[in-house]
Image (cartoon, rainbow, N blue to C red):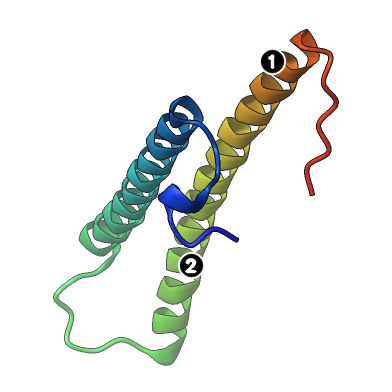
């Protein structure tokens, strides 16, 4: 595996495309993390109160609800990522087919 973007052994045009994709992926990661943080903040605002004490059952219910919310957020982010990656691979294959190439990714 290449240790940096400069070790990819591709032409400048492809290197720039890879750089843009890496940048896009980092932005997507940051967006996903902000989404998780927002979900957590919304949960705290809506479900937690200034009560001094909670029972073990109440805490467990809160934690389960919180985990459900985070799981849904995570699932949405993963779904978005695989759709973006699928589109990218589709475009790559379509371009290869225009040149009568058959790609065999590992």
User: In the figure, 10 relative to 13: above or below?
Assistant: below
The x and y percentages for residue 96 are 74, 19
Disc number lying in front (2 or 1): 1
Q: Identify the residue under disc 2.
A: 67
Q: Nearer the viewer, residue 98 or 35?
A: 98
Q: Disc 1 on helix, strand or loop?
A: helix
**Residue at the (17%, 87%) spot, across then down:** 52
Q: Nearer the viewer, residue 24 or 29?
A: 24
Q: Are marks 2 and 1 in contact (CB under 8 Å)?
A: no
Q: Disc 2 on helix, strand or loop?
A: helix
User: In the figure, 95 relative to 27: above or below?
Assistant: above
Quarter of the image where the N terminus is located: bottom right
Q: Nearer the viewer, residue 27 or 7?
A: 7
Categorize mark 2 by other alpha carbons within 10 Å: few (<14), some (14-19), many (20+). Answer: few
**Residue at the (24%, 89%) spot, across then down:** 53
The x and y percentages for residue 49 are 19, 70
Q: Identify the residue under disc 1.
A: 95
User: In the figure, 79 relative to 62: above or below?
Assistant: above
**With 63 as the anchor, is 27 left or right in this view?**
left
2 or 1: tag closer to the N-terminus? 2
Rendered image: mark on residue 37: none
The x and y percentages for residue 89 are 67, 30
**With 7 as the anchor, is 31 left or right in this view?**
left
The x and y percentages for residue 61 are 47, 75
Q: Nearer the viewer, residue 14 or 40?
A: 14
**Residue at the (63%, 25%) spot, across then down:** 87
**With 27 as the anchor, is 11 left or right in this view?**
right
Marks 2 and 1 sit apart, C-alpha to C-alpha, by 42 Å
User: In the figure, 69 relative to 87: above or below?
Assistant: below
Categorize mark 1 by other alpha carbons within 10 Å: few (<14), some (14-19), many (20+). Answer: few
The single residue placed furthest to the top in the displayed view is 98
């Amino acid at each position: 595996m290449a240790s940096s973007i400069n070790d990819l052994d591709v032409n400048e045009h492809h290197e720039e495309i890879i750089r843009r994709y890496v940048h896009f992926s980092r932005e997507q990661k940051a967006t996903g993390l902000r989404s998780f943080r927002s979900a957590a903040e919304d949960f705290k605002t809506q479900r937690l109160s200034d009560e001094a004490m909670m029972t073990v059952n109440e805490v467990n219910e809160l934690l389960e609800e919180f985990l459900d919310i985070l799981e849904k957020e995570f699932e949405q982010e993963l779904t978005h990522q695989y759709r973006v990656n699928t589109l990218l691979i589709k475009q790559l294959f379509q371009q290869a087919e225009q040149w009568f190439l058959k790609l065999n990714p590992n």
